[in-house]
Image (cartoon, grey):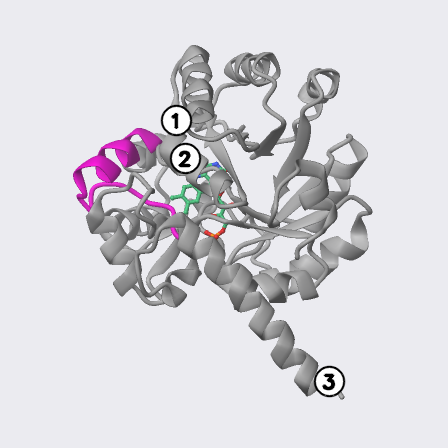
Amino acid sequence: MFKTRITEMLGIEYPILAGGMQWLSRAEFVSAVSEAGGLGFITAATFTDPEELRDEIKKTRTLTKKPIGVNISMLPVLMEGDATRKYINVVVDEKVPVVETSGRNPESYVPALKEGGVKLIHKVPAARFARKAESIGADAVTIVGFECGGHPGMDDVTSMILIPKVCESVDIPVVAAGGIADARGFVAALSLGAEGVVMGTRFLATKECPAHQNFKEWVVEAQETDTMLIERSIRNAVRVMKNEVAQKVLEMENHGATLDELIVHISGKLGKNAWLTGDLDSATIAAGQCIGLIHEVLTVKQVIDNIVNGAREIVKRLNGIVK
Ligand SMILES: Cc1cc2nc3c(=O)[nH]c(=O)nc-3n(C[C@H](O)[C@H](O)[C@H](O)COP(=O)(O)O)c2cc1C
């Protein structure tokens, strides 16, 4: 039913990808996405040692024979430059078919990936970075809009504008991310020219996501106004759940706090503990505005099936409108 350059490139049924989520995108969750006909990305930044990533890839492969990917986030706070090379080597070694990179220009890793036959999907927050990604040889580009959970860049432009803008700017396939939680967003993204979607926030409220139940309940209860943007002052804007730490960080930023002062509160390591313990106020936690559209905890398969079936209904409705 769904055939785009993304499904063809990755050999998957549906053009629905689960974007990398540090601490969460591990074997059980990633394999569930791939088993359901989409594709999940194990997130390298979860591991301090590249060999742990290798073990996780192997573990994931015991749970699914379908294609899986690895996310390599190159934001300085997540992963040091030298470490990135080692993680890329593991990906090539293990013949992982696709990598999602984010955070910085992956140009220096392109030759190794090409040689290893690994497809590169680079995730960017603006059309100019999408053009750059194409010029360095990325196989596809994911554009994230301002609504997204995680890093939306510094331009504050929403998916509604960015998706068509990027589609008219590059020839490689475009994947849309930021604000997509259901069939409506999926069809909208395809209508705007995307050939696939990446979702993060919607997958937080799934049975297989290893986040503590408290977070899943929070996602279900939360409204679209319950996220906020922090770390703008250090040019690392990130959309997170509106909790005590995030509000403190914003206040500190408004009073001119330095990176050294902020790091105590924004360090990614705090997130690991929060996801495990369910303490909603102990760390800054990435979450997108589409929390306002998420009303129940489902299995990954239910999320994907609902999108696929819902899309069919929407297309029927649209066909009825267009005479
Ligand atoms: C909890 C959480 C953690 C994330 N961690 C990462 C990460 O480690 N690396 C990355 O490239 N993107 C990360 N993202 C971004 C997602 O991969 C994806 O691009 C984004 O969630 C899409 O927007 P949405 O949340 O509106 O679906 C994270 C998102 C969330 C919600």
Q: Is residue 143 left or right of residue 168?
A: left
Mark 1 or mark 2: which comes first in sequence?
2
Label 3 sits on residue: 322
Q: Which mark is residue 25?
A: 2
Judge depth for marks 3 and 2 and give the one in front.
3
- Decide: few, some or many residues near mark 3? Use Cα within 10 Å; few <14, some 14-19, many ≥20: few
- Amino acid residing under circle 3: Val
Amino acid bearing label 1: Thr
Label 1: how many Cα within 10 Å (few below 14, some 14–19, many 20+): many
Which residue is denoted by mark 1 in the rendering?
Answer: 46
Which circle's residue, 3 or 1, is located before the other in the chain?
Answer: 1
The answer to whether marks 3 and 1 mark residues whose Cβ atoms lie closer than 8 Å is no
Residue 146 horizontal side relative to residue 252, left or right: right
**What residue appears at the point 57 percent right and 18 percent down from the top-left corner?**
91
Q: Secondary structure at mark 2?
A: loop
Q: Is 75 drawn above or below residue 114 in the view shown?
A: below
Task: Specify the amino acid type for callout 2.
Answer: Ser
